[in-house]
Image (tube, rainbow, N blue to C red):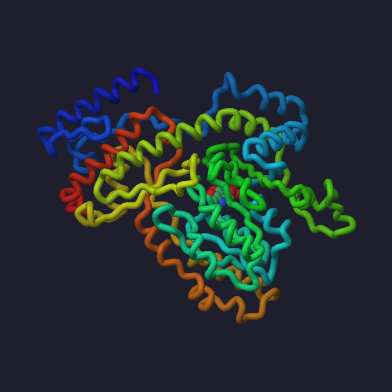
Amino acid sequence: MNNEQLTNRREFIKKGTLLGATLAVSPTLFGNVQLGGRPAILGGQGIWENKQWPQWPRWNPETDEKGLLEVMRSGRWVRGTRTNDFEQRWATAIGTKRALTVVNGTSALTTAINSFGIGPGDEVIVPPYTFIATVSAVLFNGAIPVFADIDPETFQIDPKQIEAKITSKTKAILPVHILGLPADMNAIMQIARAHNLVVIEDACQAHLAEYDGKKVGSIGNAGCFSFQNSKNLPIGEGGAITSNDEAFIDRCMSYHNFGLPTGQFTPGQDGMLGNKLRFTEYQAAIGLVMLARLAEETDIRHTHAAYLSSLLKEVPGITPCQLYPEVSRGAYHLYPFRYDPAQFAGLSRDGFLKALRAEGVPCSGGYHPLNTQPFIKASFDSPLFRKAYPSDEIQYERYLERNQCPANDQLCKEAVWLTQNMLLGPRSDMDEIAAAINRIQKNAPKIVKLPA
Ligand SMILES: Cc1ncc(COP(=O)(O)O)c(C=O)c1O
């Protein structure tokens, strides 16, 4: 944001404040923002009416295009030295011996699950509060996802719920560091060790998030990342698998390249049906640019998120998401909090989202419960599942019963998300987001009376 935009915004906030003194509640100091005034949804001026949120992805033609142009002009666009370089740097950034790039985060997950030999007859424990790909990657391999409920304070899979879901068929736990915030990995690893289970971390939203001094994606047997357009390391599409297990990465490498021999793995002898999921040199060229600024951006998100949480916890009815004590850095792919209508004069979450958007603050209600989505039943009805399983093992009503997640059902009704780019502007943006939410809370008795 340039100086002129900043000045306009300050002027604009000042006007809104003065106007508000006569029209609605008196101005209050909240964070560092003096804010009263009528909320935009009641006809006042939106706090961000003229606001440009930090753009995403960030691309600076002067500094960012050199490597990409070199690739394009070289004529070597398929996997090569730049991809090797990106993989080495990604492994170093995460703190694993190896990293393998693939076409997207979904294929990182399907490749990792396949390469641990997980398939029909096996169960994989997953959280219900995640993106669809976590669960479809299990189903693509013919295995059954088993849902363990979440902890509403942290939005993460609850280790206490995992143990109860383990059976003789369980092969892996697939914790997701959802929203870019680490799951409780020490507790999860302890359970996995006790039951001899593989742990595949879905870190698709959690680039450089840190738990107990380690980067997520380096704690379990494997980590899976996404570089899709919205992600904190955006390449448009792309993904990676990280691991300290070299033989496993060699198997993944073969799988992602038609099953051709790689490193310690000799598919000619062992037999391997491969896929083709290779990264390209132009993806690597973009990835190298994005990786160079990822650590600094991650620190800014983490610091601004902590500050925003310190402000929002003062607003009645808003509960910021908590981090586990072991977390020293959240990646905050999304900034989450819970919303309680009872403290907003009964204003529904949809009504709150509408009022916040009217202020110029983009927001959403996030995920719907995944454990009851129709794609699971459709998978059970598919030829793969019907041929691989006796019918009573994929009886859907029984499956639904076994996979209820009431805490997640409630969280899906209460959650509110802001996107990661909103944390990248000046710290004063956090004051203004919090002030807007505060002003909606103060005026909720009037907002709730608006026609739907
Ligand atoms: C938690 C999670 N897992 C997996 C994926 C899949 O990644 P991709 O979109 O790169 O296939 C995503 C992407 O949004 C995700 O958020």
Q: Quadrant of residue 70?
A: top right
Residue 136, position as x, y percentages in the image: 59, 60
* Residue 206 can be seen, yes or no: no
| 363 to the left or right of 197 | left
Query: Image point 63% across, 36% down: which residue?
Result: 93
Image height check: is 271 above or below 262?
below
The quadrant of the rendering that contains the C terminus is bottom left
**Observer-nearest residue: 195 or 6?**
195
Image height check: is 166 above or below 44?
below
Query: Image point 52% across, 29% down: which residue?
Result: 296
Residue 167, position as x, y percentages in the image: 60, 72
**Observer-nearest residue: 186 or 247?**
186
Q: How many marks?
A: 0
**Observer-nearest residue: 203 or 58?**
203
Image height check: is 315 above or below 111?
above
| 322 to the left or right of 286 | left
Residue 348, position as x, y percentages in the image: 27, 56
Query: Image point 70% across, 54% down: which residue?
Result: 111
The quadrant of the rendering that contains the N terminus is top left
Residue that extends furthest to the left in the rendered view of this protein: 22
